[in-house]
Image (cartoon, grey):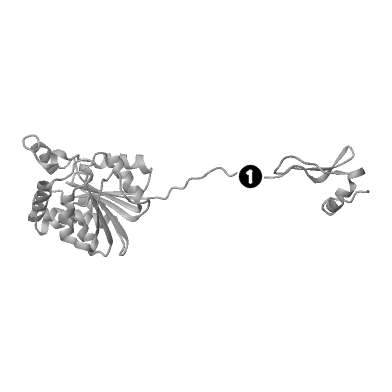
Amino acid sequence: MGYVFDFKDAQAFERWFEEPRYRFEADCENALMLDLLHPARGETVLEIGCGTGASLMPLLEMGLNATGIDASPYMLDISFKKLGNRVDLYRGSAEDLPFDDNSFNHACFMTALEFVDDPVKAIAEACRVARDRVFIGVLNRYAIENLQRRVAGLFCDTLFNHARFFGVWELKRVIRSLVGPVPLTWRTVNQLPAGRGRFVRAFEQSRWVQHCPFGTFVGMVVTLVPAFRTRPLVLRHQEETGRRHGDRLMPGTVMGSRNGPTETLCGGDNAKSCLPARDKCHGSLPV
């Protein structure tokens, strides 16, 4: 299951999200998710590790039928207070989702894969329950800000001490090993460690800038391709031999049946038994 946020973690995360600087970063991350996932109104989406519901809100605003699942009851409490009955919330593990195959159009991670115990299994579960696309949003291990967070964890206890950071190439390798050469697209945001304003917003929204692999947040979307299993087709046929007339076989007699090989004898005492079958022969036989 990985690291489960306790009450203090949930409150700290909520306070962090309310700060203007980090709120701007979260808006950039949500915008990237929607741009890459490109969902249609009325579709279903599952957010795995939904936390306090910060990323569920933009999904609801687009008219999607959203579902969230998280391992922390404290995070789910905050999410329910924000969203109420507008979203279905479940408590569970990312590595063992309580949903059937192809239950949702889309599935997504938003800075949740870092805290699971088995990221490969979590991604495999997301691909199992989704039938169209899977979005994976993670903290980039090669970004300057995340390097600072990892160094700070050496001197004090922070939430990021429990996190596992990912890079673009690592994610691509994991996904290819799970689902093969499926269509895959990635971009990054929050290239600058700090700052807001018109220039920073325009800079972050540039497609050229977002293709830099060193942004703080990596967004990757996987388009799932249906896989079909085939099995050998058993062909059933009957051997065509001939009709036995004395010591000679004549073409047109079918020998063999489901219960085993059989033969029909024509002539002599068995002539009467051949009468109904004459029309099916190539010619009539004297009796």
Q: Where residue 187 sits in the image (x, y, percent)?
A: 24, 49
230 is higher (above) or lower (below) than 56: above
Dividing the picture into quadrants, the one containing residue 256 is top right
> Outermost residue, top direction?
154
- Which part of the image, by quadrant, shows the N terminus? top left
Q: The residue under label 1 is which amino acid type?
A: Leu
Q: Which residue is found at the position 56% from the left and 42% from the top?
A: 232
Circle count: 1
- Residue 144 seen by the camera: no
Foreground residue among 96 and 26:
96
Q: Is residue 107 left or right of residue 18?
A: right
Residue, disc 1 = 235
Horizontal and vertical percent for residue 222?
A: 32, 49
Along the horizontal axis of the image, is 278 left or right of 239?
right
* Residue under the image location 31 percent in, 41 percent down: 121
Crowding at label 1, few (<14), some or many (≥20) Cα neighbours within 10 Å?
few
Q: Could you say whether the residue bearing mark 1 is in a helix, strand or loop?
A: loop
Residue 29, position as x, y percentages in the image: 19, 53
- Name the residue at 31% across, 59% down: 44
Q: Is residue 35 visible?
A: yes
Nearer to us in this view, 275 or 107: 275
Give the side of residue 101 with respect to residue 235, left or right.
Answer: left
Task: Please name the residue shown 32% across and 61% down the image.
Answer: 43
Residue 85 place in picture, x, y as percent: 22, 63
| Residue ranking furthest to the left | 155
